[in-house]
Amino acid sequence: MKSIVINHQCGHSETHEDTGGFRAGFLEWLKTNDCTSCFKQNEENKCLPKLINGTEKQIAWAENIRKKAIGEMKNSLRLYKAKHEHSQRAEAVVLKRQLNTKAKYWIDMRTLEFNLAWLEQQCEY
């Protein structure tokens, strides 16, 4: 079995195992697509509501901030679930933030670290 490294359009490189002989057209097609992890992340983000209340430039900036923040929140939620027995409140906190559609909110939150300490603080009663 031959390993082939593909440089994807997202900027990441990924090793693909050639189990039966890749056709040249397929290899070219792989290069024009995102790597597996970027593809999965983009698919998850398609379910999010569109951002509103801002200029086109602000909304584009806020989308990038939101994408990074949601990744941090998901990681924090995973750590929270491993540490705490009950995680329903933490799940609700993360979902509420993910569904915020105001571009201004995400721009204002751009310096906040959505880490485990942040999530634990949000879950305090």
Image: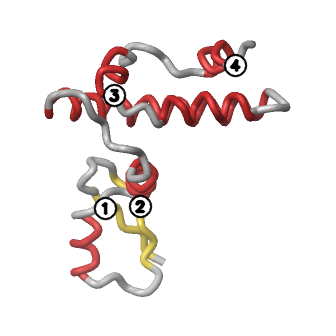
Q: Which is nearer the eye, 82 or 105?
A: 105
Q: Which residue is mark 3?
A: 102
Instruction: Say what secondary structure mark 2 lies in.
Output: strand
Measured Cα–Cα span from mark 4 to mark 2: 40 Å
Point out the residue furthest to the front here.
Answer: 53
- Mark nearest the camera among 1 and 3 is 3
Instruction: Say what secondary structure mark 1 lies in.
Output: strand
**If you read the primary sequence from the N terminus, does the residue marked by circle 2 or circle 3 appear first?**
2
Measured Cα–Cα span from mark 1 to mark 2: 6 Å
- Mark nearest the camera among 2 and 3 is 3
**If you read the primary sequence from the N terminus, does the residue marked by circle 3 or circle 4 appear first?**
3
Q: Which residue is mark 4?
A: 123
Q: Is residue 17 left or right of residue 10?
A: right
x and y percentages locating residue 107 in the rendered image: 31, 20
**If you read the primary sequence from the N terminus, does the residue marked by circle 1 or circle 2 appear first?**
1
Measured Cα–Cα span from mark 4 to mark 1: 42 Å
Crowding near pointer 3: few (<14 within 10 Å), some, many (20+)? some
Crowding near pointer 1: few (<14 within 10 Å), some, many (20+)? some
**If you read the primary sequence from the N terminus, does the residue marked by circle 4 or circle 2 appear first?**
2
At label 1, the amino acid type is: Ile
**If you read the primary sequence from the N terminus, does the residue marked by circle 4 or circle 1 appear first?**
1
Q: Is residue 94 left or right of residue 78?
A: left
Instruction: Say what secondary structure mark 4 lies in.
Output: loop
Q: Residue at x 20, y 27 (%)?
A: 54
Q: Residue at x 38, y 13 (%)?
A: 111
Crowding near pointer 2: few (<14 within 10 Å), some, many (20+)? few
Q: Residue 19 got which mark?
A: none
**If you read the primary sequence from the N terminus, does the residue marked by circle 1 or circle 3 appear first?**
1
